[in-house]
Amino acid sequence: MTNFFSRCVITAAAAAAGLPAAASAQSVTSGAVLEEVIVTAQRREESLQQTPVSIRVLTSEALAERAIASELDLQTSLPGLTVKAGQTANQLNYAIRGQTIDSFSSSRPAVLPYFNELQVGGSASTSFYDLGSVQVLKGPQGTLFGRNSTGGAVLFTSAKPTNELGGYVAGWAGDYSDTKIEGALNIPLVEDKLLMRISAFYRDQEGYQHNRFTNSSLGDMERQNARLSLTFNPTDRITNEFVFDYANAEGTNISSVAYNAFAIGEGAPFVPSNFLYSPLVDLAFGAGAWDAFLAAHPGADPDGWNAFVDKQNQRGPFDIDVDAPNFHLSENIIVSNITTIELSDTLQLRSILGYTDIENWNASEFDGTPYPSDDNGEVGRGGELEQFSAELQLQGTAFDTQLEYVTGIYYSDEEDDVYSLSVLFDLLPAAPAVEQINAGVITNDTIAVYAQGTLDLSDLTGSEGLALTLGGRFSEEEVTFDRTDADFFITSPVPPGATYVDPLNDTFNQFSWTAGLEKQVNDELLVYLFSRRSYRSGGFNFFAPPVPGFGSETGAEYMEERATDIEFGIKYQGALGDTPFRLNTAIYQMWIDDIQRSNYVSVFGSLAGITVNVPEAQIKGIEIDAEILPTEWLSLGAALNYTDAEFTKNRVSVLGNPSVEFGPYPDTPEFSGSIYADMSFPLQNGLNVFFRTDVYHQTETYFSSTDATLNPGTRIPGYSVTDFRLGIEHPDNGWSLAAYFKNAFDETYYVGGIGFKSLFAVNTVIPGPPRTYMLEARYSF
């Protein structure tokens, strides 16, 4: 155990020992009550405060209060969860404790999303509506959920049908012509036997980027969603829960923006775009070449590449000038069917079946300029991901309820049909554009068996509330990459000395485990110490030639990523004097081997984002969540995350290129946190007035793993975002009116980017939303 971890455990334990004994319910005189939060981190419903896992939760009420409508809204409400954009604001991925996936990577996300216990693929922005909760599980997840992940999991649970006739309808209107309406209707078709819930969501908004090149807005979006939920209880011991979820979106993408560029002669980009798209091109193609290019490309800035990047920085990220075609289309279907059979009072059998069909097509800018250096063209990039999964699970208790356990078998069949067009280096009339097509089908067949149990050691040890948890999971993943006939590497001549193999195939076997001790000191205090190991499966690079072997051996394959951690946590919920108080703290250290990160390189004369394995990294940190209710009309809360991440062995060679040193560690602010105040005051006639403010802050971070070497200039400054909510409600009559101000002080900040200097002499970024406001009306019945 490292000195850092030892010191933190000792400090936290001392702090826990100093916590005051909680006041009993009768002695709390403030009138305020901290509500119990139920989570499913261990595949069973239990109190957040009695679950030995670092979790952040947003209930359905919290989601509504914060006007959370998509993934980007989550970050400011869930510190420690970074929602990062890549090529566009619709290309989103999660990062937890430094673990994530890069743009143009072929690897699986390090933080996996789940919908109603189904692991769902895809990285496009979605709509949040009629949800029961969002749970963020931090750290390696390897024993209990459908797939292994090294960073964590985000669990989305839809609202379930109930035995009461009712529902809600809500709508808002805001700037950028933002209109939204959503609602749900709960219908007990047969009391206690057949329950139905229907919900729907519609949103139409204009984008907040103006593109000078086309005199149009970017980020326009129209979303349509619908969900049908049925709960069937044929007997007292059998329950079947069926959910059909449909989502459709179309519009344009918030574009990447040129952030900084190499000066002429600086660095060694594969394509010196800063030279080719400037008056200096005359030196390469002869006098008059630049004027001829400008004549063939109306709208291109006549001052050249680097001068344009300077102008873009002066204008800011919402007034842009890009030439690429731009569109976003997606259609998603998710079907889940969960059957629960109570075999006895102590044994439960569950069948979890799922199907997803996710289609996404995008066209957008790569270089962030009005020059045709690189974009997706009119066809764009996209494809269809189909997944079928089945899980059979036993949950129960034994030894007079001293042992709680879950065991099962999991199977998944996944097929990802992907097509990507890149239009490169248009220098007409001197030289035509190059069209590079990468296309193929990636299949993944997974089977896993798992078991985990928690044994109460109170009687064995004489220490009341002491429990031991052990869990293990064996997984086998067979991955195949079969390129289609249109693929660039299939249609191009095989380079001398190279041997192509198509399809490429490999099988990855993994054993994940969990081991830990927990001590329920009393009803208010839980202390735990856990260690976990999990994996991220290896695979094949989509943009690399089909050469057998690993990337470090000039091949197309990348290895598994392995994460091992140790976490010490304290969860306390009681009172300070007569004031309800909650404090949850986690201290952790992670060791990651063969970290999967992207390296943007030239491969046999083409451009590629190659997934490579960086040998070793260590990540350590502290997470603190606190909430206090001084009165029944005031709630105060704060969250703080400290993360220290570094590559400890960082030199990588890929496909025969010279080795590269990776660092600093990207996508990981050293500090992030939030504070909030939530107030509600009673008025006359049953009315309440409410006010809430949330402030989120994070320190600087980097969006490239190679800022210190290949791609300098990928630092994103720290930023703060403040949100306000003000309104009035009549709880007894079920209606409320609220005004929201998001990013109220109009902070300009960035939510991701791509380090493209090594390829195109420029880095690009994606801006976060500017200040927005909306007025919402909500009625529950």
Image: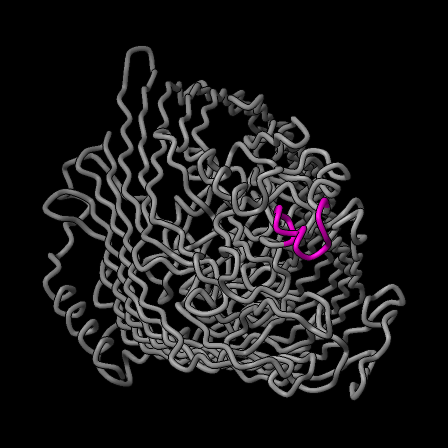
Q: Quadrant of residue 125?
A: top right
The residue at 50%/75% (across/down) is: 595
The residue at 45%/24% (across/down) is: 773
Residue 286: say if magenta: yes
The residue at 74%/48% (across/down) is: 361
Q: Is residue 714 left or right of residue 390?
A: left
Q: Looking at the image, what colour scheme do you see?
A: one colour
Residue 502: say if magenta: no
Residue found farthest to the top: 685
Q: Quick check: 433 above or below 720?
A: below
For residue 328, say whether it is visible: no
The x and y percentages for residue 679 are 27, 29
Q: Quick check: 701 above or below 299?
A: below
Q: Is residue 465 left or right of residue 427?
A: left
Residue found farthest to the front: 287
The x and y percentages for residue 547 are 75, 82
Q: Quadrant of residue 453?
A: bottom left
Q: Quadrant of residue 391?
A: bottom right
| Residue 167 vs residue 636, the one in the foreground | 636
| Residue 781 vs residue 74, the one in the foreground | 74
For residue 466, say whether it is visible: yes
The quadrant of the image that shows the N terminus is: bottom left
Q: Which residues are magenta?
A: 276-288
The x and y percentages for residue 752 are 49, 51
Q: Quick check: 39 above or below 461?
A: above
The x and y percentages for residue 265 are 52, 61
Q: Main secondary structure of the magenta part?
A: helix
